Amino acid sequence: MQRNTRVRLCSLELENTDMSTPYYVSPEQIRQDKEDFVRRGITQAKEVVVLEYRDGLLMVAENPRKTTFKVSEIYDRIALAAAGRIAEYEALRVAGIRESEIKGFRYYREDVTAKWLTNLYSQHMGAVAQAWDAKPLEIELLVCEVGATDASASSGLQRNQIYHIAFDGIYSEEEKYAVIGGRAIAITEILERNYADGLEMPAALQLITETFQTVEADAEDSYEITPETIEVACLEQTTARRKFRRLSTDEVTALLS
Amino acid sequence: MLDLDDYGTSNFFQILKRHHPELLTTLDSPDFASNARTAESSFLPYEGTTVLAVVYDTGVIMAGDRQATEGYQVGERRIQKVYPVDRYSAIAVAGAAGPCIEMAKLFQVEVEFYEKTEGVSLSLEGQANFLSHLVRSNLELAMQGLIVLPLFAGYDLKRHRGRIFKYDAVGGRYEEGDYYAIGSGGKDARTTLKKRYTPEITRQDALEIVAEALWDAADEDIATGGPDLIRKIFPTLYTITEEGVAEIPETTVEELYRELISRL
């Protein structure tokens, strides 16, 4: 609350002539404050890992809920993984589906790309983060697109793509795997050591669950990783038009045994 | 910034109407309709012809011929009139080809949009009802002669059977229990189906009567295309069962017709 007041005072500075000492906050300070504010929220968010495996992209989240998802289908080849406040990314998920469908309806389904959607989200999140009268979105997103069937596809746009968007709209392209959520750094460090190219789905899933287990073992309030407490979905190169598939608890159990 | 006001609207048609009406001109524009009327004598839209659906013991078959006509001319020999909608439903269209294809495409996007935003599939009955709205929204064009009539079929996962829905030009929705056929050769196809259909018919028998019904429609109706053995163009057939929508491979359809011809 106090933070918002400061931001507001800054923009109203010139009008507040009756104040004896104008309250000045530097732009750097505003940005830093907003970042601290979001970081406090994000550190509590459970993680989502997106990882390239032999046939596409595997997406796994720590999530014991059965109907509220952190990973979801956007369009034929595109999925969204999110960490942070559900209400905030839920609105972006639906807007992403809508904009994609409109674009695909107007032109052609293949014209809808993760790069385009990432820019759309990035612009929106950036605008919210910079607005003086709004709080930044307390979310992090991974926009993922599965590549063409041929794994050796040379063109950049035919390969798997993972875009990591921070709360302020700044995004980066990631390869092999990407992690969002509170302990993203710790998880990335473990994946750095253990990731191998061309893993089959069971091995890839095993790697992610073991990584979660390792991180959870160190946690104070440890959370047990079982097929019931994780959410698993994938974007498969081999399936028909709609590449997104959610794996049921039974399928996950079978893959992990 | 992204417009987040439409959150809660799982209705894609509504979103297009509100924000992108230009994308719906073929379906809902009085200007287009009156121009089509004044140009009527010289302007003939492509017309699609016979499509049908037959319920069998474990599902439903949906099929259509491949020809579109332009007046008394063949406009297109390989047009598609049957389109899968979601995993368990399909739409077939008869009437003015352009608006027909547009309606099928919009309907498919609508159902998928609902499924993705809501996280659950739209029920078969819900899909059938929504299609009523689409047909009704096309009323203006229908009055000018650019009619679009769909036939809708799917596998009802709750009731464990195939179901068929037919429509009238003003959006009336009627369920058919066993079979139905629409389009210029629809009546001929229905006659064959009426004589050959038996309740709880098997998949193979149903495929045979579907092939025969389309054959008879092509035989009686000049606008309906029959199997073209020289160009290898055959009607499209889809089955919809508990396992989902599946297209019958062209080779299988060819066999059905070769066998039918040998029996003639």
Image: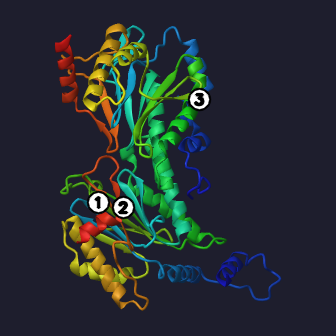
Give the amino acid type for the residue marked by disc 1 in the picture. Answer: Asn
Up-down: is B70 above or below B201?
above
Answer with left or right where residue A29 lies relative to residue B55. Answer: right
In the rendered image, which residue does mark 2 sit on? A144
In the rendered image, which residue does mark 3 sit on? B136
Answer whether residue B23 is visible to the viewer in this image.
no
Up-down: is B46 above or below A82?
above
Q: What residue is rendered at 43% in x and 14% in y? A: B187
Q: Say which element carries label 3.
A: helix
Distance between mark 1 and mark 2 Cα atoms = 8 Å
Give the amino acid type for the residue marked by disc 3 in the picture. Answer: Arg
- Quadrant in the rendering for residue A215: bottom left
Give the amino acid type for the residue marked by disc 2 in the picture. Answer: Cys
Residue A160: image tag: 1
Q: Both on one chain, marks 1 and 2?
A: yes
Distance between mark 2 and mark 3 Cα atoms = 39 Å
Where residue B153 sits: x, y (%)? 42, 33
Answer with left or right where residue A227 lies relative to residue B119. Answer: left
Where residue A8 sits: x, y (%)? 69, 77
Using the image, name the chain to which the residue with label 1 belongs: A
Using the image, name the chain to which the residue with label 3 belongs: B
